Each structure stands twice: as C-alpha cells, then as structure tokens.
Image: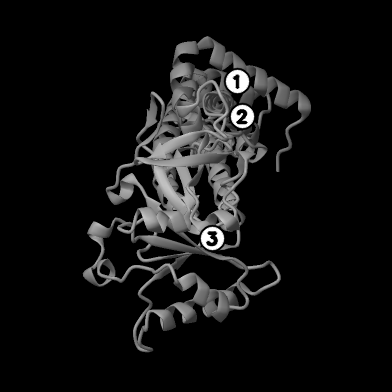
Amino acid sequence: MAIMTLAQAQENFLAAMETLRSSKVRSALTVLGIVIGVSSVISMAAIIQGLNKFVQNKVESLGSRTYFLTRFPPGMDPAHMPERIRTRRYLEYNYADFIRQAAPDVQIVTTVGTRGFFFGDSNLITSGNHSVEKVIVRGAEPEYTDAIPLFAIERGRFISAFDQQHGRPVVVLGAAISESLFPTTDAVGKTVRINGGAYEVIGVFEHDQGLFLGPGVDIFAIIPLSNFKKQYPEAKELVMLFTVPKNVNIELAQGEVIQAMRRLRRVPADKGNDFELSSPDFLSNLWNQLTGALVILTTVISSIGLLVGGIGVMNIMLISVTERTQEIGVRKAIGARRADIRLQFLLEAVILTLVGGTIGILIGSGISTLVRALAPSIPATLSYLWVSIGFGISVGVGLFFGYYPANVAANLDPIDCLRYE
C-alpha cells in the first residue's frame, strides 16, 4: 500500500492549485454546483434550527404541563370535519367545577371564552379618538396566567378573584392595543370601551407578536370570565385548560379528566370521546409537518446542485487527465506508482470540491446571519455540526466523482503517455 509523504502531499496540493489557476473560468463554473448545494443545505439547516428553537420556546411558554379540552381538534377547519365532529355539543361553563372535584391529581382547571375573527366575530376597542378593531376579546379566570405563562403582566395586575366573583368591568390589554389607544400615556387606570361597554384597564401584557401559526398576546384583551358570560352569551365556543403537577403521572391525571368529561357529557361506554384533549405539542407537530416539506425541497435543490457539481468535477478531471497525459508518462517513467498518480488526481478533485464547499459554507453562514439580523426572534445559527457536514459533503463529492478520472490516469500506459501528442 502506497503512503504519501508530506512533501508529496504538498507537491500534489500545489499541482492541484496550479490546475485551478490555469483554468479559472472552467474551475469556477465547475464548483458553482457545489456552492449552490452546500450553501442551500447550510442556510436552510441554520434557519430551520432557529425556527425550531423559536417554536419550542413558544410551546414552553404555553405551559409544558398544560393541557387543553376543546370541542374540535386544534388546528383544523370545522368546515372540513366529518359531521359527527361538527355536530358535537359545546363545552359548558360549569364543567370546571365538576372536574376539580372528580380529578384530584389535576392542579389548575380553568375555562376561557373567546370572541375573535376566527369565529366570525368583530370587536372594537376605543379610547377617545383612538380605536383598534382587529383584537381578540377573551374571558378568563384568575388562574389563567398560571396555566399559560405566555400571558405575562408587564404593568399593573391580572384579573383577581374579586373581579371574577363580581363580574367587574375590568380589562388587561395586549401591548400593541395599549400602545395604539394610549401612545403617549400609561394605559393602566384609564377607561376604554369594548364593543360599547366601559372597562377599566388594570394591566398590560408583555409584548408578544405571536407565532406565524396563530395570533400573539399583543392583540388580546382579557376580561373576567363572569363578565364575558354576561356580555356575550352567544359566544359558546369555550376552551378548558388544566395543569398537571410535576410529581403526578400525566397519563393518570389525563385519565381522570377524560372520565370526568365523559360522565359530564354522558358519553356511552362503547362510544369515543366527543371532545378533544391536546397539549401545546400540537404546535410542534404542525410545525414539523411544515418543515418536512422544506427539508424535502432543500434536499432536492442541494442534491441537484451537488450532482451537477460532481459531474462538472468529473468532467474537468477527465479533461485534466487528457491534457496532462505526457506529464503522467514522465512521472511513471521516473518511478511514480499507480497509487501515487491516483492520489494526486483524487487530491485535485477534493481540493476543487472543498473550494466550492468552503464558499458554500460562507454563503450559508451569511444568509443565516442576515436572517437573524432581519428577524431577531428567529435565532438562525450555523452550528459546528452543519459546518462539519458541509465539509464532509464537499470531500465526499470530490472522492466519489474524482475516483473514476483518477483511476483512468493511474491505469494509463507510460509508453503510450510519452508518445501522446
């Protein structure tokens, strides 16, 4: 087995660089496919990794052990559901009290009512000459912010037990609503009109523009659930939330809630649930389905680029073998072995693809930096793993597509090489 010395490796490296320099345009066009393939892999991996972290942070902010009870499966359009699901009965306001008694392993059980554009409702909040239309009015109980930490108070306070007990006309505003209605003053303590009714602003939430899959806290206005029930009796689409303590088995707690719901809704033993139990993970699952298509698209684009680049490498190496036939003959005449010739041309192919891979990695890194600068909430970062994968792909393409030309060069007959014109 042939072993290449450091001097031989350096000589082959310089020969490879000289080949690249002698045909700059041809070499540039050859590595272009490698650049496109590697840069698309690197940039998309960085962006998807950043988006995954962003989505995961959102899911955690919804409560890692918070679960939802709804009439319909989350994220689905009722118009496209089977009739047996579309005709399910609404959840009721009194369910929460029953579940608190029937499910001892559950910590928080709370109900929310929502009036939003996705239900075909319109809301208007005004203060003086300022008004906001595209808002979501939600009725909630004091435990709501404990169940969903995403709704964090920046100023003032949240709804209290006293507010809920007496159905007081108080409201906690999203930051965007607060800034629109009170651009120069603090909203806390001021009075706003929600769909014509007067409400005192008792708090303002921290900024949250939301996930691209749904609205953020910024456009929510939350009032006591008791007041919501009184003002909007037609808003029957309720959602229930419950939390499971860390020291309690999740399946056990969920089983208690499911059994309580089935008794409440008088579901026969041989029938399936006529409600849905879900966790914030449904956002992650939905996002994974969306990114799956992106991954496939990126793989196709990068594969085409790498294939074109690899064929280009093979082509330029075969041309190089033809142009340097006499050189190969001279090297063999003075003692170069087949393995030496093969290693020399393989090294040239690998250097060619490494140049393309390095440029691709730099472009991919630049794209991820640009994305991070334009959208700070998406922490697109180029990890060492993907840099290593980029280099690995480059070397792999060079070895795979460079072996045939290198083998052709190694098997040339030295006598025929010296006679070649």
Q: Is residue 169 above or below residue 392?
A: below
Q: Is residue 232 above or below residue 212?
A: below
Locate the N terminus by quadrant: top right
| Numbered label attached to residue 165 | 3
The answer to whether 315 appears left or right of 415 in the picture is left
The residue drawn where x is 51% and y is 45% is: 170
**Mark 3 or mark 2, earlier in chain:** 3
Q: Nearer the viewer, residue 411 or 254?
A: 254
Q: Are marks 1 and 2 in contact (CB under 8 Å)?
A: yes
User: Helix, strand or loop at disc 2?
Assistant: helix
The residue drawn where x is 63% and y is 33% is: 343
| Numbered label attached to residue 347 | 2
Q: Nearer the viewer, residue 144 or 23?
A: 144
**Mark 1 or mark 2, earlier in chain:** 1
| Numbered label attached to residue 180 | none
C-alpha separation, residue under disc 1 versus residue under disc 3: 82 Å
Residue 272 at what x, y percent from top left? Answer: 36, 80
Amino acid type shown at disc 3: Gln
C-alpha separation, residue under disc 3 versus residue under disc 2: 79 Å
Residue 376 at what x, y percent from top left? Answer: 57, 29
Q: Disc 1 marks which residue? A: 16
The residue drawn where x is 48% and y is 29% is: 34
The residue drawn where x is 48% and y is 82% is: 259
